[in-house]
Amino acid sequence: GAVVSQHPSWVICKSGTSVKIECRSLDFQATTMFWYRQFPKQSLMLMATSNEGSKATYEQGVEKDKFLINHASLTLSTLTVTSAHPEDSSFYICSAKSPGVETEAFFGQGTRLTVV
Amino acid sequence: GQNIDQPTEMTATEGAIVQINCTYQTSGFNGLFWYQQHAGEAPTFLSYNVLDGLEEKGRFSSFLSRSKGYSYLLLKELQMKDSASYLCAVKDNDYKLSFGAGTTVTVRA
């Protein structure tokens, strides 16, 4: 199956700093990637849809100026959490859509962000 | 909006069968996924249904009734390693996935 790599796996940062998370499709070109957030003991919540070469589409309630998404190439999307605060501590997961594959969404390994 | 319901927790013994139900009310439907997720890890794909009926894959089976907005995941011959959270997710026409809150399954010896 298609492989999606997410980096870093975990990160600890100080409050007020910014953190960048990368999501790469390793063996296919992903025109669309999705970013999810998961708080402890809760399910995945879609934050935004990342489209290659265009602006991301954010879900209601997600601050686009705080969660910057860049999808500059067909294999890379990045999520930058700006001015992070402790309440942003969460598990962030990306997924990518492989062209022509409708039966499965391919997830990255996830990034555990802790803001202290 | 999307509304996806599944039980919060289920407990079963090793070797038994467990059925996890999922009901959904969504604006747009283009398939239903089941994922397994262990704590702190990304979800792992289990099954995908887009047509009514039963899909069997080894010890796991998934059923879909589109007219009833209902699906279930059936886990047979339970093993200790099956202890995890099981997520029901509905795909809309834009390929966005809406997830249920997840069902934590605990397998006891």
Image: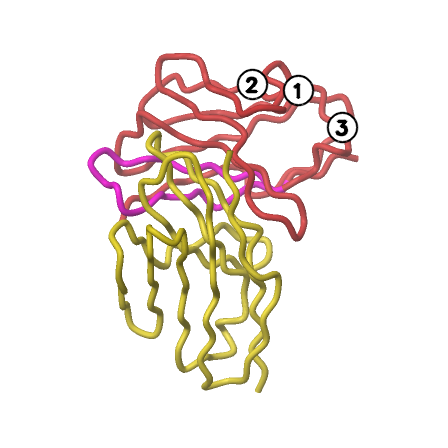
Chain colours: A red, B yellow
Element under disc 1: loop
For the residues labelled 2 and 1, say whether their Cβ atoms are less than 8 Å apart: yes
**Residue B30 point in image, percent of width and height:** 31, 40
Q: Which mark is residue A82?
A: 1
| Tag 2 secondary structure | strand
Q: Is residue B88 above or below residue A116?
A: below
Q: Amino acid at mark 2?
A: Leu
Q: Nearer the viewer, residue A26 or B92?
A: B92
Judge whether A71 appears above or below B67 on screen.
above
Calculate the distance from the C-alpha at mark 2 to the C-alpha at mark 1.
Answer: 7 Å
- Residue B17 shows which numbered tag? none
Q: Nearer the viewer, residue A65 or A9?
A: A65
Q: Which mark is residue A68?
A: 2
Disc 3 marks a residue whose amino acid type is His
- State the image coordinates of residue A82 (x, y, percent, origin top left): 66, 20
Answer with left or right where residue A21 lies relative to residue B28.
right
Given the image, on which type of amino acid does mark 1 rest?
Thr
Task: Determine the chain carrying the residue at label 2.
Answer: A
Q: The numbered mark 3 sits on a residue in which chain?
A: A
Name the side, left or right, on which B19 lies relative to A106.
right
Which residues are the magenta region?
A91-112
Residue drawn at (79%, 35%) of the image: A116
Q: Residues within 10 Å of mark 1 (few under 14, many from 20)?
A: some
Alpha carbon separation for disc pair 3 and 2: 15 Å
Q: Is residue A102 magenta?
A: yes
Looking at marks 3 and 2 on the same chain, the residue that comes earlier in the sequence is marked by: 2
User: Mark 2 vs mark 1: same chain?
Assistant: yes
Question: Where is residue B29 drawn, in percent x and y?
Answer: 35, 40
Residue corresponding to mark 3: A85
